[in-house]
Image: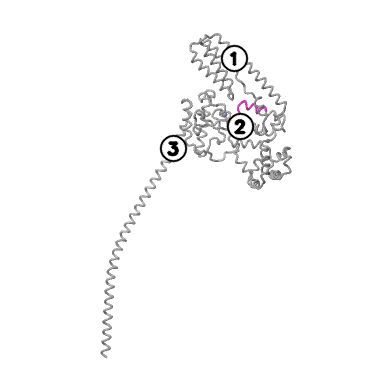
Amino acid sequence: MKIEQIQNNFIDFNGRLPNIKINDTRQIPHLKCAICGKEMLTFNEFQATLNKTLLGANKFLKSKELESYQSQNVFAMLVDLAKHHPKTPISILIQDPKFQKNIKKLSIQEQKTLNDIIELSKTKTKNSKQVIKQLLKLQPLFDKNMQEVISILEVYSLRYPDQTFSEILHKPEIIKYHKENVKIESLKYKTLQNKAQRNFLSIAKHLHLEELHNFNTLYTNILKIITIPHSTNQVRFEMLLNTFEKYKRVATNLDPKILKKISTAIQKFPIENFSTSQKILSMVSKNDANIIENLLSYLQVSFEHVIPKSRQGSKDKGNGICLHMICNKNRGVLPYTLINRIYPDFQSNLQKQINTVISYIKGGRLLTYEEYPQQIKKTMLYATHQNIRINIKKYLKYQAQKAKQKLEKEQQNLTLRSEKLEKTKQEINQAEVLLNQLKEKIQLLRQKEHNDIIKYKQAKTNCFNMKNEYQKTLKAIKKDK
Ligand SMILES: [Zn+2]
């Protein structure tokens, strides 16, 4: 039973959301990326998906690489553990508290052996036929290029269903095929680039000597832009336009016809296409699980510093939005004004993300974020020179409403307290009256007591006198006899 509990600790994002409290926006399930608008994977979702692709304990323990361990005590322990949950990965099974207790009793050498086996189990996935099922579920969340990579993996899974992806991608014929592809693509690109470069430089003959300096600067900038690593094509294209705008501002005396020529020549610079084959090749050296991890990492959520760290942006949540790791990498330190032009949906995607965050704050499921909507709005305004305005009117109204409710509650409390205080005061007054009456009564009683004492003493004296008189009479009787 415990194993199911451990598995359930990872949120199953196909099911209903458990009502848990979180304190980081990166833990919000199904949150959509502010740049591309597609769903991201939280760390738990990432781990849960990865676990679904890992090899089950039973099959793993039968793998050839474990033959040398088979005679050992720890191996027998694992076989025993796998009996009830043969399809669950070893790395999950060992989290069973009872098993954890037993581990502590093992010798250091045995613990080391166990660790080696567990680490090995984390690198082993199911065969391609089973793994592709998990990947296809997530395929719509990837960008077009990565969707293409997954489609190729699907083809391989049909061709070699019983092998793992790392076995498939290590096949010499597959490596050879993709290497050829990369070569052809790169040749094509280089040819286009050379042509564009020649075309661009040919404009120089129409320019006056004093115009050549600016033209050369423009050319150097273009070469820089088209060779920036980790940048998307759209970003590069926008940067080319940007650098041309700058050029136009300095080259004021230029003939409009030549300017048009330059603009056309710039647009002919090829943008290197993302190479699916290159991506496939980059996966080859990795083990089974690494391939899946690498693919899933494209979907993983990350904290994006709106004002980059390199520009004194703070680490506070108020300077952050959530982006795919890959979208974060592509953004780099590009200003958001540019991002807004490259991704026309950026503003609405960002708004959607903030709305989701707000719904979590309102539902009391996201703690310590009450001030976040105001903060991120301010950050975004600052970072975009007032261009991107997040709408938080409803949230502010909600906050005002909440503050009003709190005030009303406190006012009610105040009235209640003042009433209670008044009542107690009255009670004190009543008690004081009573006390005074009692004091008067005591006074009277004291007087009465005083009189009684006098009367008592008088009576005592009288009694003494009477006794004497009586005895005197008795003596007189005796004498009279
Ligand atoms: Zn994204």
Determine the residue located farthest toward the bottom in the rendered image: 481
Mark 1 or 3, which is nearer the eye? 1
Per the image, the residue denoted by label 1 is 197
Query: What range of the chain is rendered magenta?
Result: 142-152
Dot 3 beta carbon under 8 Å from ligand 1:
no
Q: Which residue is found at the position 29% from the left and 70% from the top?
A: 453
Count of marks overlaid on the render: 3
Mark 2 → mark 1, Cα distance in angstroms: 37 Å
| Horizontal relation, residue 250 to residue 85: left or right | left
Q: Where is residue 191 in the image (x, y as percent from the top left)?
A: 64, 16
Q: In this view, does 305 lie above or below 210?
A: below
Per the image, the residue denoted by label 2 is 297
Mark 3 or 2, which is nearer the eye? 2
Indicate the amino acid at tag 1: Gln
The one of 41 and 266 positioned closer to us in this rendering:
266
Write down which quadrant ligand 1 falls in. Answer: top right
Indicate the amino acid at tag 3: Gln
Q: Main secondary structure of the magenta part?
A: helix
Indicate the amino acid at tag 2: Ser
Q: Is mark 3 on a helix, strand or loop?
A: helix
Residue 24 inside the magenta-drawn segment: no
Q: Label 3: few (<14), some or many (≥20) within 10 Å?
A: few
Mark 1 → mark 3, Cα distance in angstroms: 62 Å
Per the image, the residue denoted by label 3 is 401
Q: Do the residues labelled 1 and 3 touch (CB within 8 Å)?
A: no
Q: Which residue is found at the position 26% from the left and 84% from the top?
A: 472
